[in-house]
Amino acid sequence: MNDHQEELVAQFRQYLATMSDDGDIGEHDERHMDLFSLHSELTALKNEVRIESRQFKGALDDFRSVFSTLENANKSLTDKLAAEREEKASIESRTKRPLLMGLLDIHDRIDAGLRALADTPQPFPAFLCRRQTAALKAFEEGQQMVATRITDLLASCGVQPIKAVGERFEPTTMRAVSTLSDSTKESDVVVEEIRKGFTLGGGVLRPAEVRVNKV
């Protein structure tokens, strides 16, 4: 091989080497472009997730605001209904009170009449006054029926008697009109009820008038 041929072969080898180097650079650029695309996709996805998170947070805040508004409205309505019920109960109590006090007065009068009848001595001799005795007994039974009817009517209105005799004196439900000293009984215990007391709806309609033991 002469010098000219060797020179041509050398140039061809150099050309092939150049082509090989260019191929390597192309593959490197392709790999570089793939990583760049992946990074761009990840960045876009991250931004999208951030935007959706903000939208979700905004929707959650709106829901909380609506829920808080509904809760406040429900509490306001509940308080309003409670106030209306309390006002209604107060009006009913003020309206019924005079009527109930009138019934209690009638009850007291009938009860006093029945006690007076019980303390009245029987006529003597009884066989001479049978008609009067029968009339008196019928009157007593009628009065007792009226007293029972009044008691039932008061109970249907929520009026309940205050238990006093044998109980310790309670100034919120009782009023002491007199005292006595009995060493056989405990001090501050009610020994006699002068006038019966009543409650209405948990409150005192009329305090019981009592006699209290003081030792």
Image (cartoon, rainbow, N blue to C red):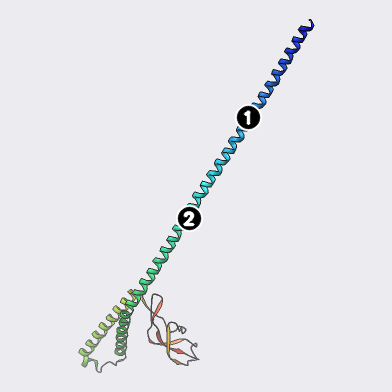
Residue farthest front in this picture: 4
Above or below residue 146? Residue 30 is: above
- x, y percent for residue 120: 29, 92
Residue at image point 54% right, 45% down:
53
Q: Earlier in the sequence, mark 2 or mark 1?
A: 1
Residue 213 or 70: which is nearer the viewer? 70
Residue at image mark 1? 33
Mark 2–mark 1 Cα distance, whole angstroms, equals 48 Å
Q: Secondary structure at mark 2?
A: helix
Asked whether, in this view, residue 207 is left or right of residue 9, the answer is left
Q: Which quadrant holds residue 72?
A: bottom left
Q: Which quadrant holds residue 13?
A: top right
Residue 159 or 80: which is nearer the viewer? 80
Asked whether, in this view, residue 91 is left or right of residue 168, the answer is left
Name which residue type carries label 2: Ser
Q: Secondary structure at mark 1?
A: helix
Mark 2 or mark 1: which is in front?
1
Quarter of the figure that contains the N terminus: top right
Residue at image point 29% right, 85% down:
110
Q: Residues within 10 Å of mark 1 (few under 14, many from 20)?
A: few
Name which residue type carries label 1: Met
Asked whether, in this view, residue 99 is left or right of residue 48, the answer is left
Q: Which mark is residue 65?
A: 2
- x, y percent for residue 191: 43, 88
